[in-house]
Image (tube, helix red, strand yellow):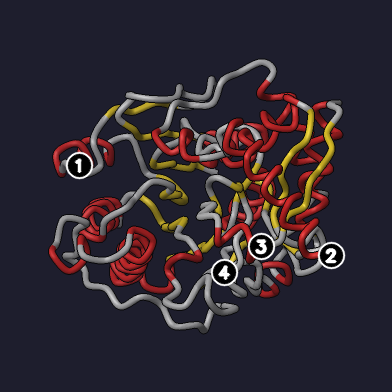
Amino acid sequence: MRLLILGGTWFLGRTLAETALANGWQVTCFNRGRSGRDVPGTQGVRGDRTNQADVDRLTTYGPWDAVIDTSVYEPPDATLTAQRLRDAAARYVLVSTVSAYRWWPHEPVNENSLLWPSRPDARESDPDLSAMPGPYAYGTLKSGCEQAVTKVYGDQALILRPGVVLGPYEYVGRLPALLGRAARGGRMLAAGNPHQLIQPIDVRDLSDFTLRSITADTRGAFNVAAPHGHAKYGDLLEACIAATGSDVDLVWADAGWLAEQDVRQWTEMPLWRTPPGTWAVDASRAIEAGLKARPLRDTILDTWRWLQVENPVPHQRQSEHGLAPDKELRLIEAWENERALRCR
């Protein structure tokens, strides 16, 4: 099997390249070469996916049985790569996101849920998009990318919509921030309900499902998330403590109270989010098609082991995650005072 990955040096792209090579596939990775590094054994081709001449030059390295697009952000760029690669790659796999759904995370979603309305020429700098909150603009652009690829490839397109993806090589910083905090030990602020069900997917399970779907000639759109009931938020934090071997005392604070303190969900408190649809992504279709989800504790332990030997690829979002130590201490003290008042 011959595979082209648009990207291939970060998180999912790197995992895909390694897994495909281990399966005996021939792998070409197309990227600018500015960050990350090529996986040994792959054929690296340098170029800018937004430059038609670069993409045309890329086609001379084909043909491929499939292309996996892990990096597209704006619809015109998706159109360019899909059109120029149409004769060189038989299948197009677009890694989109559950953010493409109009009502996520506010409502549960399945593959029939409404997507953000978009258009093939949409750019982040357009006045209507720049006026949107960042997550809405992101979802709109990703929805447009799906439309662009489907228009060119038709039923030869495979659209994957992952929820939260964790595991080794993560660059966003969510799990590394939690692991780093656990490693410091002491009293650690925890948000909301430890029994809140969560459904992050391991990057290796997403990679396995993607490659298996190519082999099986799977088509259409699939949400990719762990099944409901897979893990709880408390499991996540306890697994971080166990992986680091640290001495941590979790201090669970009420979600409503934390919101009143202007604690930022998803970033200052990584992977904590209160909208009801956040962890209500229906992935039953992917599970029926072969998606497997390993235990969350394995994902966390393997990520910690990776962090002992390698730093994540630098990314601006990493600084967003985690509470400043002085703010965490103030919040713990304030919450304990609040709890004492409530018990009177």
Q: Secondary structure at mark 2?
A: loop
Looking at the rendered structure, the kind of residue marked 3 is Ala
Horizontal arrangement in the rendering, residue 253 relative to residue 100 (left or right):
right
Marks 3 and 2 sit apart, C-alpha to C-alpha, by 20 Å
Q: Work out whether mark 1 precedes mark 4 in sequence or the reverse, and give the earlier one.
A: 1
| Camera-side mark, 4 or 2 | 2
The answer to whether one can see residue 253 in this image is yes
Q: Are marks 1 and 2 in contact (CB under 8 Å)?
A: no
Looking at the rendered structure, the kind of residue marked 4 is Phe
Marks 1 and 4 sit apart, C-alpha to C-alpha, by 30 Å
Tell me, for residue 344, which label it has, or none. 2
Q: Work out whether mark 1 precedes mark 3 in sequence or the reverse, and give the earlier one.
A: 1
- The residue to which callout 3 is attached is 255
Label 2 neighbourhood size at 10 Å, few (<14), some (14-19), many (20+)? few
Q: Work out whether mark 4 precedes mark 2 in sequence or the reverse, and give the earlier one.
A: 4
Label 4 neighbourhood size at 10 Å, few (<14), some (14-19), many (20+)? many
